[in-house]
Amino acid sequence: MRISQIWRYPIKSIGGESLATATVDVTGLTGDRGWGLADPASGTVLTARREPRLLLATCRLVDSHPVTTTPAGDELHTSADYSDWLGRPVELVAAGDTGGTFENPMDPFGETDWISWTGPAQAWHDSGRTRVSLVSTASLGNWDPRRFRANIILEGDGEDALVDQSVRLGTCILDITKQIDRCVMVTRPQPGLDRDLDVLKTLIRERANRLAIGGLVAEPGRIDIGDELTKAGEDGALSA
């Protein structure tokens, strides 16, 4: 399998940017999930589970700072900009030494029974066992990869078999820890994508509600489109 796409999502739950190359440190792709929009009253970090409009915008890093473009073409830089766009007070905050607090519905279809939970520090991923996420083109099928917000799209198939293995991509090594469970976010509309509950229903029915794999960074480095995935310590492409 080879890297066919690289994606970075600077702000939690906002659309991301496609890259040709990326540096990878212990927090994941440098700048990935490095910021969030927090409710100043509760401290909760907004996600598209509660605020689907976030996925309609896209974010990129400019001089190591997130710049978001709204569907209307406006650029957002400051907390005031984001508050004006959403019509509610929010603060643009950088992930730090404490984990962010998020919300998730226990009923993903009725979107009821919301519970709060705390994610890992440093970069606001959904799991402390995942800093980089990968999915194959075979697993995606006809689904747009943006629905699943994986960092690395691999040309080929067989990524599920990599769980509990160490793999090399470019000059970095990843310890693959788990398959990634999915939530209501995969159903949300995005630019060019309609709301689609069938995505989540299909995942539950056919894949035990899991798509993509996640891992921790054992050795930081750099990845580029076209890099082959190999088992750590072995030469040659991994056939899985």
Image: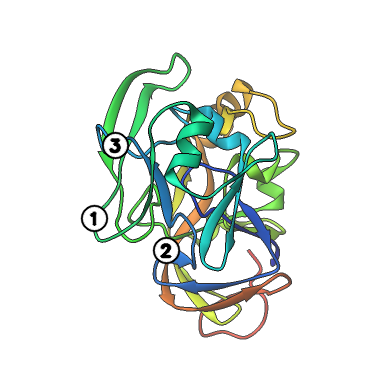
| Residue carrying label 2 | 164
In percent of width and height, residue 167 lies at: 52, 73
Nearest the viewer among 41 and 9 is: 41
User: Are dots 1 and 3 in contact, CB under 8 Å?
Assistant: no
What numbered label is drawn on residue 14? none
| SS assignment at label 3 | loop
Sequence-wise first label, 2 or 1: 1
In percent of width and height, residue 237 lies at: 67, 76
Quadrant holding the N terminus: bottom right
Q: CA distance from mark 2 to mark 1?
A: 27 Å
- The answer to whether one can see residue 82 in this image is yes
| Residue carrying label 1 | 98
| SS assignment at label 1 | loop
Q: Is residue 223 above or below residue 233?
A: above
Amino acid type, residue under disc 3 in the picture: Pro
Q: CA distance from mark 1 to mark 3?
A: 16 Å
| Residue carrying label 3 | 40
